[in-house]
Amino acid sequence: MIIWGIVANSHDASIAVFKDNELRWAGLSKDFSKIPNDGHLNKKIIRRAMRLGKPNKVIWYERPFLKTLRQYWAGQGWLGKENDIPKYLSQYGINCPIEYTQHHLSHAAYAYYTQPHDDCAVIVMDSIGEFETLTIWHGKNNKLKKIHSQGYPHSLGLFYSAMTQRMGLQAQRDEYLVADMAAQGDPDRYTNLLLTEIVDLNQGRPFIKMRENMHRGIDWWRQGEINPADYNDLAAAVQSVFETCLLEIHEWTLLKTKSKYLALAGGGALNRKAVNLIRQDRYPAHVPHNPGDPGSCVGAVLAQTKTKIDLEGKWMNGL
């Protein structure tokens, strides 16, 4: 049985090829198209995956109908045709049966089933997946149980991306630059302002409330007051707020699960400085390769097979 896990029709498209529940290969579309953050499949990556065999089944990393509902609810219009996955895949010659998993479950499975411990807590934090923005899971007896879910638009991922855009950078691509800028800035200058006007930490752990809808962007915020010369300080404050929130979430997760091990996935897990704060507390924190959406091509399959795997050498170019 050959199963392909696929992430596409969004950003950072990817394919994972499993044969008899063993991961044989995974790769990103951008490495074939040379288009940064390429969100679509292409003939080259399909040909590369086909070397290992034509798929008997595809597992798509999220539920397109839920995504369509959320997009409509968010004011993006009805995008049902754009989210027609059988039609989308057929243009690449993929016409096998398709199954769907949930966005955050794909992330959680990727984190849990790529680390060795049976009892392991999992934090998934991203911009948004279907309607969820933060989920916390307890992995035990080779199963994942969701113990907390936070929904749109209260999203730390969207907060970070919206502030990235506010500083003149591109969201879903340049967040790493904000983390670099933060090292050059003074967090004390704007942290209290962010906690007063944007992020509300007074809702009780682990819930993080956004005072503004980050999905609509925040370009308007403090225009004329916070200018490019201030961006390093703003970046430092954004990073500080993100770190504070992650540590709050981490502490709650420990108390709730009593687990000695932690795994993280979703775009938030790409923030190495924040993750390293957990590790500085001598707490084991597993972050798999490509913990954002690209890794969910692997996670979507693992959510179904529930098989522990070793990622070593499986991602093309060591990604």
Image (cartoon, grey):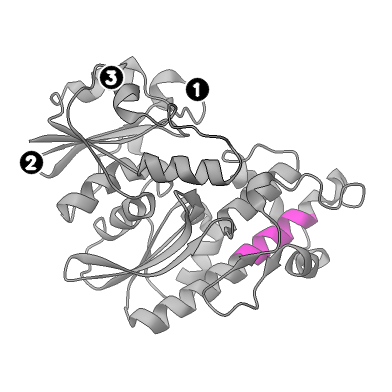
Three-letter code, disc 3: Ser
Q: Which residue is mark 3?
A: 90
Q: CA distance from mark 2 to mark 3?
A: 24 Å
Callout 1 crowding tier (Cα within 10 Å): few <14, some 14–19, many ≥20:
few
Residue range corresponding to the magenta coloring: 233-242
Q: Is residue 310 visible?
A: no
Residue 21 placement (x, y as % from top left) = 12, 45
Q: Mark 3 or 1 closer to N-term?
A: 1
Three-letter code, disc 1: Ile
Residue 300 placement (x, y as % from top left) = 27, 46
Q: CA distance from mark 3 to mark 1?
A: 22 Å
Q: Is residue 50 visible?
A: yes
Mark in the foreground, 3 or 1: 3
Q: Which residue is mark 2?
A: 20
**Which numbered tag is attached to residue 47?**
none
In the rendered view, would you say 153 is above or below 246? above
Residue 213 placement (x, y as % from top left) = 67, 54
Q: Are circles 2 and 3 on residues that touch, CB within 8 Å?
A: no
Q: Quadrant of the C terminus?
A: top left
